[in-house]
Image (spheres, rainbow, N blue to C red):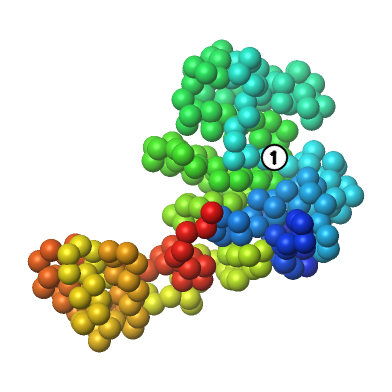
Amino acid sequence: MSAILSVEGLVKRFAGVEAIAGLDFAVQRGECFGLLGPNGAGKSTTLKSVLGLLEPDAGRIRLLGFEIPAQAREARARVGVVPQADALDPDFTVAENLIVFGRYFGLSRATIEARLDALLDFAGLAHKREAKIHEISGGMRRRLTLARALVNDPEVLFLDEPTTGLDPQARHLIWERLRQLLAGGKTIVLTTHFMEEAERLCTRLAIIDHGRRIAMDTPAALVASRIEPHVVEASGDGVHRWAREQAPALAARVELVGETAFAYCASPEQAGVAAASATGFAALRVLQRPANLEDVFLELTGRELRD
């Protein structure tokens, strides 16, 4: 299967510092491919380079058969982009925002208006067709931005943290809409800080840090190969003593982060014993759960804050 997007040896420097340091990945048609990483890892720089908005210092990018950045204009005509900021025009109504944006792609007004009802229905905004942007909620604005990215019927959709700042209801609605797009054959490239979002949506993902790819696989395969399968979390008074005196003998690995201890266990039986020992401390709050993508992400990139 040929890649719809291929990135080979991508390098981008700012003031002599490598923001991207030899990045490689490929995206197949019809998949949702995730780019995960801490703040400053190079995710947004990678997206800007792929879209031809930044010229790389080295490497090769091909998007939909076009060489980037030389043929970026041709490629961008066949993609949709949902940026971190909505950037909707406050002077226009919901419908007018879609019409004006479609005109940027050279689409006729008749063509755009023929797509309008379907786009508004997709975004759940048919009842807000004539509303001004200040009259709709943040979740509605985000859904409108997604609909706007589809106005040219793109083959590839680039989503840069599409659900940041949304409440759970709005987030789940956008996830459902993205699943519909994937079922319809669209290709999605997604950056996100929500590990649950990546696990739910991504066919495959790459974790990058300091501009380098440090892991790439399906979410399930990364969890299975990179982390112990069971986790006991304990927090509260006495957690330091439990993590120091009991947990190390009961778990494969223990991490103490602030007032929370994470005991990583190789089996459910081992996790059960570790959890039982923690419940012996009356003030501890204890959670026993399967390992997830967030555990993998923190194991690979560390728990320290990134500014």
Q: Does dot 1 land on a helix, a strand or a loop?
A: strand
Q: Quadrant of the C terminus?
A: bottom right
Q: Mark 1 points at which residue?
A: 80
Task: Tell me what residue is drawn at x 30 percent, y 75 percent.
Answer: 263
Residue 298 in the image: state x and y as whole percent.
Answer: 46, 66
Image-quadrant location for residue 79: top right
Left or right side of 115 for 276? left
Dot 1 surroundings within 10 Å: few (below 14), some, or many (20 or more)?
many
Residue at (43% x, 75% y) in the render: 227
Q: Nearer the viewer, residue 201 or 10?
A: 10
Can the viewer see residue 220? no
Please say whether residue 263 is visible from this viewpoint: yes
Q: Which of 63 and 12 is in front in this view?
A: 12
**Identity of the residue furthest to the right in this view:** 70
Q: Identify the image quadrant of residue 291.
A: bottom left
The structure residue drawn at horizontal position 77% and vertical position 24%, both measured from the top left corner, is: 103
- Left or right, residue 54 beside residue 159: right
Q: Please provide percent x and percent y for residue 269.
A: 24, 80
Q: Count every numbered label the image shows and give the total.
A: 1
Residue 168 image offset from top left, x and y in percent: 39, 41
Question: In the current view of this chain or complex, which residue is farthest to the front?
Answer: 15
Left or right, 25 with respect to 143, comes to right
Q: x, y (%) of residue 53?
A: 78, 45
Residue 188 versus residue 152 in the image, above or below: below
Q: In which quarter of the image is the N terminus?
A: bottom right
The amino acid pointed to by label 1 is Gly
Question: Which corner quadrant of the image does residue 15 belong to?
Answer: bottom right
Residue at horizontal 34 percent and vertical 67 percent from the top: 257
